[in-house]
Image: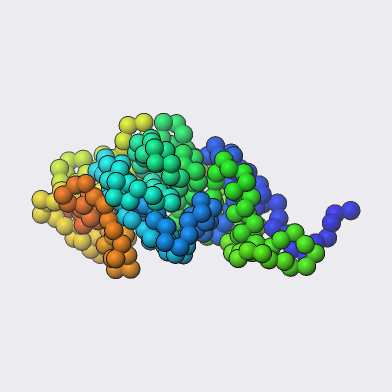
Amino acid sequence: MTQIGLHHFGENVNKFEEELSKYVGAKHGVALSSGTAAIHMALKAVGVTNGDLVFCSSLTFAATANPIIYQNATPVFIDSESETWNMDPKALEKAFEKYPNPKAVIVVHLYGTPAKINEIMEICKKHNVPLIEDAAESLGSTYYDKQTGTFGKYGIYSFNGNKIITTSGGGMLVSDDEERIQKVRFWVTQAREKARHYEHKEIGYNYRMSNICAGIGRGQLKVLNERIHKKTDIYNRYKEGLKEITEISIQPIPKNTVPNHWLSSIVLDTRSKVKPIEIIEALEKENIESRPVWKPMHLEPVFKDYDFIQVEEESIAKKLFENGVCLPSDTKMTNEEQDVVINKIKSLF
């Protein structure tokens, strides 16, 4: 007879964890309510607490940095480099010179393009500091044929509504450290001890993914490679369609990386007569949404008191924000619709 219980997470959650971990090549995963929750738990799992320093990519969405504050820790933001738009290994080295003992490093794979992860890993190993990979935007992207999110001690993925696959809202934390993943699984189910009654010795969180969301995730995982293929087509069409405009360059693809091209983004030459806002407004008139590149965390009012480490005279992250535009990249977009975007942009030059 099947056991009748009061509550059960259900088959889909376990299966989704197994299937996603297998896809990326991680040993263990725990499905959570968001990518933000996954970053929060990664920080907690490495022992980040009051007053600790955490080095973090500046050019990212606030969800990367907010969990550092949840743990009462102090972020130190790191500038980008222009070859990947991601964390600059030289700036990371400089941060270690200034602050030799951070508790963790969070690197972001922006818009699906892998960071210079080998160099970053080397630096983290040398200083014996765990690396957390924010692969929220880069599920399916590879660096030297290895999936982003599987290089560091922890990798995080997001299945938010706008991501390459979605569970409507959700995230996943992956790691090869079984003991820590089990511990996270305990924390995210309200840290309930094994007892007949409700027993709690630690503060817990209501961060576990629901069975329904996990079921959606399992279905979406089946079309992930197809989505990556479509996103790559979109990127290539933009690259080809805009190549005559010398003032525009598209986010570069570094050697030995295969991005998922989650979002196709361009950057304008600083000398360009046309400014990003003119592109955004021209597309808006056609009812087409585009937007600026992420505003770097060190420029956000909420983080203005935290240190920012750069090696270039002018911050690369700031330059990308001021000159960049994220173009429509939805997999449902037709070639004709994409041509409208390309032709509209070309008409401005």
Residue 303, given in percent of the width and then of the height, sits at 32, 65
Closer to the camera in the image, 335 or 91: 91
Residue 253 placement, left or right of 186: left
Residue 259 placement, left or right of 147: left
Closer to the camera in the image, 122 or 344: 122
Closer to the camera in the image, 44 or 295: 44
Residue 41, given in percent of the width and then of the height, sits at 53, 56
How are the residues colored? rainbow
Residue 65 placement, left or right of 195: left
Residue 207, given in percent of the width and then of the height, sits at 58, 61
Q: Residue at x 35, y 36 (%)?
A: 119
Q: Residue at x 42, y 38 (%)?
A: 125
Closer to the camera in the image, 102 or 347: 102
Callout count: 0
From what the image shows, is residue 257 above or below residue 214?
above
Residue 144, given in percent of the width and then of the height, sits at 41, 31
Q: Is residue 115 visible?
A: yes
